[in-house]
Amino acid sequence: MKFVAEIDIMPHKELLDPQGKTVAKNMNHVHIEGVEDVRIGKHITMTLHADSEEIAHEIVETACKKLLANLIMENYTFNVKPLE
């Protein structure tokens, strides 16, 4: 079966996010008001083949832990669904 995983990787809330701080600081320069905080991360879409949704979930979990996310500085969330 074919699956698609939508993965979001964000810096830990305890860590500074210099990119996010810069964007938040400059929002008013482009006439966007009321923004208090911006956090910038990564969004990854992965298409994969697996025998079941459970196996697809395990593959994505392993990819996040071993390759996609730096677990010291980032956390991740994802969902997996069958591709029709």
Image: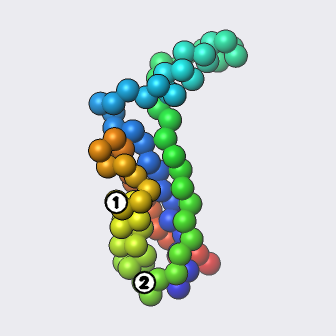
Q: Quadrant of the C terminus?
A: bottom right
Residue 1 visible in this rendered orientation of the protein: yes
Residue 38 visible in this rendered orientation of the protein: no
Q: Residues within 10 Å of mark 2 (few under 14, many from 20)?
A: few
Question: Vertical placement of 26 versus 79: above or below?
Answer: above
**Observer-nearest of 72 and 60:** 72
Q: Quadrant of residue 83?
A: bottom right
Q: How many marks are shown on the rendered structure?
A: 2
User: Which disc is residue 65 wearing?
Assistant: 1
Q: Residues within 10 Å of mark 1 (few under 14, many from 20)?
A: few
Q: Residue at x 41, y 65 (%)?
A: 63
Q: Position of residue 72 (x, y in %)?
A: 29, 44
Question: Vertical placement of 24 versus 72: above or below?
Answer: above
Question: Vertical placement of 71 versus 25: above or below?
Answer: below
Q: Residue at x 35, y 73 (%)?
A: 58
**Does 83 sit left or right of 69 as displayed?**
right
Q: Position of residue 26 (x, y in %)?
A: 60, 16
User: What kind of colouring is applied to the model shown?
Assistant: rainbow
Question: Vertical placement of 33 versus 17: above or below?
Answer: above
Q: Amino acid at mark 2?
A: Ser
Q: Amino acid at mark 1?
A: Lys
Q: Position of residue 12 (x, y in %)?
A: 34, 38
Q: Residue at x 50, y 27 (%)?
A: 20
- SS class of the residue under badge 2? loop
**Disc 2 and disc 1: Cα gap in Å?**
20 Å
Give the mark nearer the N terminus: 2 vs 1. 2
Q: Residue at x 53, y 85 (%)?
A: 1
Q: Position of residue 13 (x, y in %)?
A: 33, 33
- SS class of the residue under badge 1? helix
**Observer-nearest of 36 and 13:** 13
Residue named by callout 2? 52
